[in-house]
Image (cartoon, rainbow, N blue to C red):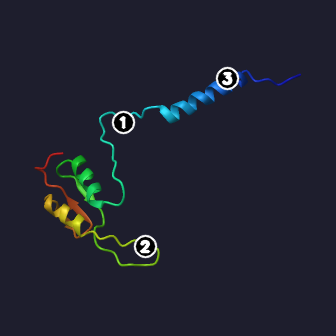
Amino acid sequence: MSRTSVLAPMRGPALFGLLCTILFGSTARGDETRLSISGYDPVAYFTRIDQAMSGGGVLVTNISDRHDEFMHVSPKLGPLRQAVESRGYEEILPSFIYQKADGQRR
């Protein structure tokens, strides 16, 4: 007696359909802006976060310069600190917690 599966004839078309969906299918993102920043640009990432954050929102981060260590990247975050300051964020905990002013809109 042979053990033929009812789904065996559908395997080829189903896999082909799945592959086409993965390769050519659209993503359901609606009106979201795609984050397309190439390379390491912390100011660009902060700008996108700032645009999405409502007034009164809290930014928890670490924008202090770090010490060089083995296997550790030491980014220069001075421009990022200037961007946070120029947008009027209140420093709650130095270099770590900031709050966006209530009057600022998205």
**Marking on residue 29:** 1
Residue marked by disc 3: 10
Residue at point 33% right, 70% down?
A: 75
Q: Position of residue 15 (x, y in %)?
A: 62, 30
Badge 2 crowding class, 10 Å Cα cut-off, few under 14, some 14 to 19, many 20 or more, is: few
Q: Which comes sooner in the sequence, label 1 or label 3?
A: 3
Residue marked by disc 2: 72
Residue at point 51% right, 35% down?
A: 23
Residue in front for this viewpoint, 82 or 90? 82
Q: Residue furthest right?
A: 1
The amino acid type of the residue labelled 2 equals: His
Image quadrant in which the N terminus is located:
top right
Residue 24 in the image: above or below residue 48:
above
Q: Which comes sooner in the sequence, label 1 or label 2?
A: 1
The amino acid type of the residue labelled 3 equals: Met
Cα distance in 3D space between marks 1 and 2: 34 Å
